[in-house]
Image (spheres, grey):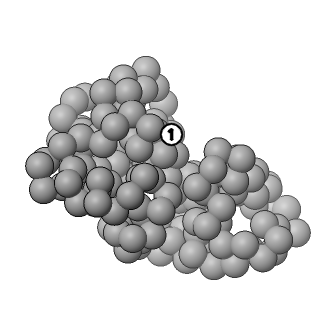
Amino acid sequence: MEAILRICEVLGGDRVLGRKIQSPFDLDEAVKHGLPFSSFERVCEKIALSAAEAIDLVASSSRTMARRKARHQRLNAAESDRLARLARIFARALDVLEDEEKARRWLHKPNRSLGGRVPLRVMDTDIGALEVERVLGRLEHGIFG
């Protein structure tokens, strides 16, 4: 449950999400309903992503996201799912590294365990995201190589 609360915090908390998240199923429903555009902005801020970088990871096009922002529209379910994935991995990095700045730096720097790739650059697919989470799990257990 603590992990879900951390993910919600990265997404902007109950106030931004517009609902109380008390279980994984509450977050699942919020994602299916579509996260607010302000959650996208919050994740960009937390992870130190430019809008263009985040759009590459979350959305189909910058024009779509500009339209959502201008019209105060929610993200669709697929975009929301990808945004929640970013939030989940940042929350995991926070748990492992115990510091927001360290977590941000880790996500932005090439990683030997990822073949020299930058964690954020492989998180655009579920397979890449799983690999980033695997590396974080190894880090948590003191396995650095």
SS for tag 1? helix
Residue 108 picture location, percent across and down: 57, 75
Q: Is residue 145 above or below residue 126?
A: below
- Residue drawn 30% across and 42% down? 75
Residue 4 position by quadrant: top left
- Residue drawn 42% across and 26% down? 28
Residue 143 falls left or right of residue 55: right
Residue 6 appearing in the image = no
Q: Hey, what amino acid is under mark 1? A: Ala
Residue 74 picture location, percent across and down: 24, 41
* Residue to which mark 1 is pinned: 3
Residue 72 falls left or right of residue 112: left
Residue 50 position by quadrant: bottom left
Residue 76 picture location, percent across and down: 34, 37
Residue 21 picture location, percent across and down: 32, 29
Q: Residue furthest left?
A: 71
CA neighbours of label 1 inside 10 A, class few (<14), some (14 to 19), many (20+): few
The residue nearer to you, when weighing 87 against 137, is 87
Residue 62 falls left or right of residue 78: left
The residue nearer to you, when weighing 131 against 14, is 131
Residue 26 position by quadrant: top left
Residue 65 appearing in the image = yes
Q: Residue furthest right?
A: 145
The residue nearer to you, when weighing 40 against 136, is 40
Residue 42 falls left or right of residue 137: left
- Residue drawn 45% across and 69% down? 53
Quadrant in which the C terminus appears: bottom right
